[in-house]
Amino acid sequence: MAVRGKRGWERALVTGASAGIGTAYARELAAQGTDLVLVARNVERLEKLAQELRTDHGVGVEVLAADLSDPVQLTHVEDRLSGSPRLDLVINNAGMGAFGAFHRNTVDDELHVIDLNIDALVRLTHAAATAMTRHGAGTILNVSSIMGLAPFPGSATYAASKAFVTSFSEALHEELRGTGVTVTAAVLGIVATEFMERADAGHLDGMDVFATLKPEFVAKVTLRAARKGKALSVPGSSYGIVAALMGATPRAMLRRFNGINARRKGGALA
């Protein structure tokens, strides 16, 4: 299991920390006394958050501005993962989506989703796992989505990228058993963030009857699961039911249902 010490994780790196769930993770960890490395593109937001956390909680905070879809900038974050002072928790939260009919979007937009949601996450997970296994302790928390549990027409690449994240994280969880390093996939439903506002939630047609979760709730629940070394965390009881139903429903039925909803609501496939 990961090094906890008297105050929990000693030092954590959080990607996508400048807003939404990433900020909620940073605040929750700082309140627990965890020193932080904050990663995102928006350096002004990061610096403002870092000062808030230093003042409110007295923790050490490093700011590492980086666009993780840029290979050169991504390398800087990889170097920090293997550097000093060492990290015992890494949260791969940064992500993006391209929504709408696949053939109407540019291929560059679709590939950008893969660059960030898959390539960057794999590289950072590899760097973290390599360093953590060397020390015999650590925790990796990869943020995924309930959309990864089914085909979602209108957000084909995004949903597929999250399917990768969940499967990849579960496999590593088992692969690293006995090393002292655990991997947890946070499988999230609808969360009230800027990401959802930009996407207009159209990619989740058919799921809007369920609760919109607060980032603070998501952070608390998924960190608790990661602390216990669980492979999966699905915050919110309603989403736990959704996940179970998706697993029991034939994929052809899920695919058709999601496609009909996307067209009916004039959303992603309009």
Image: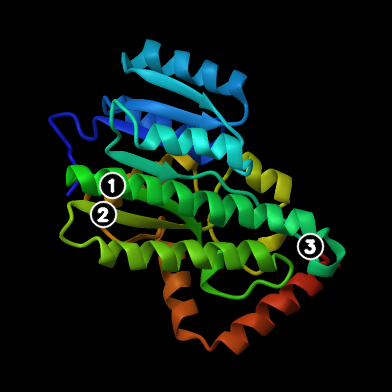
Residue at image mark 1:
139
Residue type of the residue flagged with mark 1: Thr
The residue lying at 73 percent from left, 59 percent from top is 110
Nearer to us in this view, 225 or 13: 13
Mark before the other along the chain sequence, 2 or 3: 3
Residue type of the residue flagged with mark 3: Gly
Tell me the quarter of the picture where residue 97 sits: bottom right
- Mark 2 and mark 1 in contact? Answer it, CB < 8 Å: yes
Q: Position of residue 22 (x, y in %)?
A: 49, 37
Mark 1 secondary-structure assignment: strand
Q: Is residue 109 above or below residue 248?
A: above
270 left or right, relative to 82: right
Q: Position of residue 269 (x, y in %)?
A: 81, 69
Q: Residues within 10 Å of mark 3 (few under 14, many from 20)?
A: many
Q: Nearer the viewer, mark 1 or mark 3?
A: 1
Q: CA distance from mark 2 to mark 3?
A: 35 Å
Residue 70 visible:
yes
38 left or right, relative to 88: right
Residue at image mark 2:
182
The residue lying at 70 percent from left, 65 percent from top is 155
Q: Position of residue 51 (x, y in %)?
A: 46, 13
Mark 3 secondary-structure assignment: loop
Mark before the other along the chain sequence, 2 or 1: 1
The residue lying at 26 percent from left, 59 percent from top is 230
Q: Nearer the viewer, mark 2 or mark 3?
A: 2
Nearer to us in this view, 188 or 239: 188
Residue at image mark 3:
100
Mark 2 secondary-structure assignment: strand
